[in-house]
Image (spheres, helix red, strand yellow):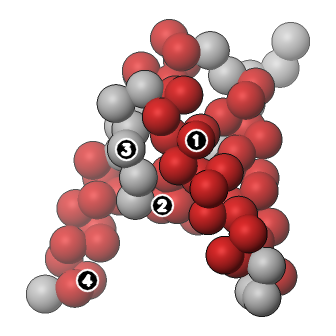
Amino acid sequence: MRKVVFEEDEMRVISMFDTESREAALHAVEEVIPMTRGDEELSAVVISAAEKLKQISDAEFAEMDFEVYRLEEEAESE
């Protein structure tokens, strides 16, 4: 089985939501899919992130570091 690799944009999308658990993140990402339909590029990233979240285990998710992406967003908004 090959390792699932998340692109930087997918990590940014996931980091915007609850990352306490894979299930919580997946649920949150799936909820915004309909809201992204007007933007093909964003929609593709959000759908891809959701699909990849379905492919990984809870243990793999727990090892992911979203803090870097949150800090980036905070620095950009200042």
**Which quadrant of the figure contains the N terminus?**
top right
Left or right: where does residue 10 sit relative to residue 42? left
Going from the N terminus, do you reach mark 2 or mark 3 first? 2
Tell me the crowding category of disc 2: few under 14, some 14 to 19, or many 20 or more residues within 10 angstroms, Cα based.
Answer: many
Residue at x-position 73% and y-position 29%: 54
Query: Residue tagged by mark 1?
Result: 27
Query: Residue tagged by mark 2?
Result: 12
Left or right: where does residue 13 sit relative to residue 4? left
Between the C-alphas of marks 2 and 3, the distance is 12 Å
Would you place residue 20 above or below residue 76 in this image?
above
Q: In this figure, what is the number of numbered marks?
A: 4
Give the image location of residue 68, x and y in percent.
30, 52
Give the image location of residue 51, x and y in percent.
78, 41
Dot 3: what SS? Answer: loop
Going from the N terminus, do you reach mark 1 or mark 4 first? 1
Find residue 76 and name its label. 4
The quarter of the picture where residue 77 lies is bottom left
Q: Amino acid at mark 4?
A: Glu
Going from the N terminus, do you reach mark 2 or mark 4 first? 2
Q: Residue furthest left?
A: 78
Going from the N terminus, do you reach mark 3 or mark 1 first? 3
Residue at x-position 58% and y-position 41%: 27
